[in-house]
Image (tube, coloured by chain):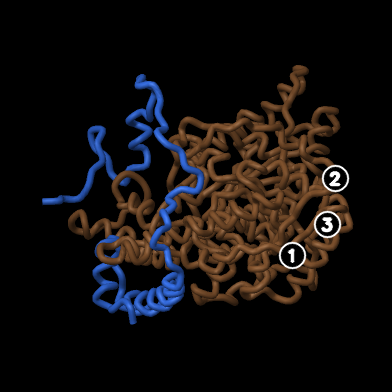
Amino acid sequence: MKISQQEIEHIALLARLKLTPEEINLYTEQLNSILECFDMLNRIDTTNVEPTAHAVELYNVLREDEVQPSLPREKALQNAPQAEDGFFKVPRIV
Amino acid sequence: MKTVGKSLAELHKLLVNKEISSVELTREYLDHIREYEPKIKAFITITEDEALKQAEEVDKAIAQGEEIGPLAGIPMALKDNLCTEGIVTTCASQMLRDFNPPYDATVVSRLKAAGAVLVGKLNMDEFAMGSSTENSGYFPTANPWDLSRVPGGSSGGSAASVAAGEVPYSLGSDTGGSIRQPAAFCGVVGLKPTYGAVSRYGLVAFASSLDQIGPLTRTVEDNALVLNAIAGHDPLDSTSVPFNKPDYTQFLENNVRGLKIGVPKEFFGLGLKQEVAAVIEQAIKTFEQLGAKIEECSLPHMEYALPAYYIIAPAECSSNLARYDGVSYGYRAEADGMIEMCKTTRAKAFGQEVKRRIMLGTYALSSGYYDAYYLKAQKVRTLVKQDFERVLAQYDILLSPTTPTVAYKLGEISDPVTCYMGDVYTIPVNLAGLPAISLPAGFTDGLPVGMQLIGNYFAEGLLYRAAYVFEQNTGYYKEIPGLLREAD
């Protein structure tokens, strides 16, 4: 076993997912079997290989620093679960 | 229905010659959709009113003697992860059940500008995560060739709707095979363009270094016509590449004499079913008879592509889907406090596969495991890309099966690892960012088999030419599902 149930619970917190005990069991089992498949990657030596983040690399995608139209506030808020006075409204944080 | 199975060029001619109006054409397709949807279930939303309004505008233009473009007045549908202003865009997730995008995706505004008539939004695996459309947060879609089988995924609705004649073409998105695999399962043509050839502005993000939008059509010519309309640089997408976009239809020449085709031997192991191999071997013979030069080649790191992908894609997904926090848009669950609200929202509105990938990706990126998984996978990605670069210096294109099997039964595959294995021939292409097309190669037991052609960066034209030659000399595109034949 590569990941324990406790680790799964920790990962779920990091991922902001409230999992049921059944889901914790299921994901512990499934993630372990998926991670086992990843072990084959250790068969290749990648010491001197550069990582690839994007297949087609573009650098310094810039434009002139000019003001252009952007999404109007009412449109940005139109899908908000809760909005007030032009702001997103969220539950109490502190 | 008179117009089912007609090509875009034929439909265009009917409109220009005023043999049919766009409104009549759109109504015919809407009737056909109504007739077949109870069986196929490819659509999440049908946009009848908007479609008829758009069709009327094209009819007005025709009446005024304006010259119309090749897609004007012709119906089409979009995978439901492409943002459409004013039309709900769900990503087949309960999370976005009521999401009404404030803007159009670039591909949508380009199709609108071309006069295309949007008739609806298509079913998919939730957030494009899956290979069968069974992970939709709403309902599964059926394969028109056999209603007890899956249409593939994640663009299952996009492929099934075209195969069932509900639309002449659709758009899908492809992160690890999500256009090509359903195209193969449903016997249609699906292209994943070069990474950066089509703008992704307004495509709901899954794995940003891999996602590409592309067309699904009945024929190669149709596919080239749609790519003409959607490809090209877009300043709104910083990964969009400035390149000289050709007219893709100019490549549709019935000649592959001297074309050098490499057949990577690694694509003929890894769970390939005998009946699929037999069809592909026959297709290779056809290409040889037509004058192409075929040789076996090798991409030694292919077996590592699948595990590398299932680290990279979930890692990017866990990061991209962090935005669904119940604050700015999408579903919100009631709970005490911010973190509890966020956790409950995500637990209730995401389906099993999405949660599984978020968990996997969060783990792979978490401190202590980053080097072992994510960085290692990115290095393996380099090796996969270098393999392709090496063989594509020797061959014009590469040929392989699109999938190891034909369409499987609904509910047949429940284990995630088995499901992931089905993407084994399509995933390497996304890691390398190359263009690839799937087209019907033949049939086995009445089910379509897909052939994948892979090309060099921005060589979509050459893929179209090879695919066109095969299509014109075999005629598999003329086959239609039994379901539609019975109706005639």
Residue at 72% in and 37% down: B248
Give the residue furthest to the left.
A94
Q: Is residue B89 left or right of residue B169?
A: left
Coordinates of residue B71 in the picture (x, y in percent):
71, 34
Q: Name the residue under label 1.
A: B449
Disc 3 marks a residue whose amino acid type is Phe
Residue A60 numbered mark, or none: none
Q: State which quadrant residue B429 falls in.
A: bottom right
Label the brown chain with its letter.
B
Residue at 20% in and 54% down: B338
Q: Is residue B311 left or right of residue B345?
A: right
Disc 2 marks a residue whose amino acid type is Asn
In terms of sequence position, does the residue under pointer 3 or pointer 1 come before the other? 3
Q: State which quadrant residue B312 falls in.
A: bottom left
Residue at 30% in and 64% down: A17
Residue B287 numbered mark, or none: 3
Residue at 57% in and 37% down: B107
In terms of sequence position, does the residue under pointer 2 or pointer 3 come before the other? 2
Q: Is circle 3 on the same chain as circle 1?
A: yes
Per the rendering, the colour in which chain A appears is blue
Q: Mark 2 points at which residue?
A: B255
In terms of sequence position, does the residue under pointer 2 or pointer 1 come before the other? 2
State how far apart marks 3 and 1 are (Cα).
16 Å
Q: State which quadrant residue B407 falls in.
A: bottom right
* Dot 3: element: helix
State how far apart marks 2 and 1 are (Cα).
23 Å
